């Protein structure tokens, strides 16, 4: 059974002819959203859709799908995640990682102390932020910066970091 990875969210419909507005969350929109490509909507069960048209409008990607020509057909997709299978993932250049590679890594600080495991990745602005929960303490929000993340070893499932001063507040 394939694994699925989020590439965007259908935030609304547009017009009455089955077009949807997509907030893109992939770093590769030009590869993911092409006419003829298959994408999946995170319904239960998943819905496979073939992209019929793609255009940009007011910062969102607008899509139509083959066989979906009416607003009532696409309304159930509103608010749902759009996904691709692991087969659609491209190899990345050295030093670049998919979120799936980072989530679950054990994070070790410059003193050899284990901080925890990455549970999710936030994208609030110019750099990603790793969320590292800790038992009985506040979670760590670690910025993904070259000055912070020193190395990532996918085989050992570890990331070695230098924690910026004042980032961890264990006073609570």
Image (tube, rainbow, N blue to C red):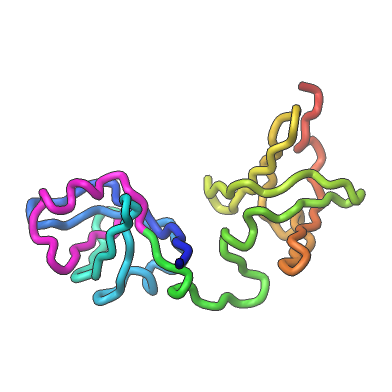
Please state if 2 lies on the left or on the right of 49 as rendered. right
Q: Nearer the viewer, residue 137 or 47?
A: 47
Location of residue 166 with respect to 68 vertically, above or below? above
Location of residue 25 with respect to 75 vertically, above or below? below
Q: Nearer the viewer, residue 109 or 44?
A: 44
Question: Which residue sits at x=81%, y=23%?
Answer: 171
Q: Which residues are magenta?
A: 60-82
Q: Position of residue 157 (x, y in %)?
A: 74, 61
Q: Position of residue 44 (x, y in %)?
A: 32, 50
Q: Position of residue 25 (x, y in %)?
A: 43, 56
- Quadrant containing the C terminus is top right
Please state if 172 lies on the left or on the right of 66 as rendered. right
Location of residue 51 with respect to 126 vertically, above or below? below
Can you tell which quarter of the image residue 91 is in?
A: bottom right
Can you tell which quarter of the image residue 33 is in?
A: bottom left
- Quadrant containing the N terminus is bottom left
């Amino acid at each position: 059974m394939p694994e699925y990875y989020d590439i965007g969210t259908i935030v609304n419909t547009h017009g009455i002819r089955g077009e949807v507005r997509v907030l893109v969350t992939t770093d590769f929109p030009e590869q993911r959203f092409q006419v003829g490509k298959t994408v999946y909507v995170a319904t239960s069960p998943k819905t496979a859709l073939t992209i019929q048209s793609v255009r940009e409008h007011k910062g969102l990607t607008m899509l139509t799908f083959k066989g979906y020509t009416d607003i009532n057909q696409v309304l159930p997709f509103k608010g749902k995640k759009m996904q691709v299978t692991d087969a659609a993932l491209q190899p990345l250049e050295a030093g670049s990682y998919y979120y799936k590679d980072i989530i679950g890594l054990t994070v070790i600080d410059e003193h050899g102390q284990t901080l925890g495991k990455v549970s999710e990745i936030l994208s609030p602005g110019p750099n990603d932020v790793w969320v590292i929960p800790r038992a009985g303490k506040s979670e760590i929000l670690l910025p993904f910066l070259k000055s912070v993340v020193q190395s990532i070893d996918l085989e050992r499932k570890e990331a070695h970091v230098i924690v910026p001063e004042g980032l961890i507040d264990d006073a609570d």
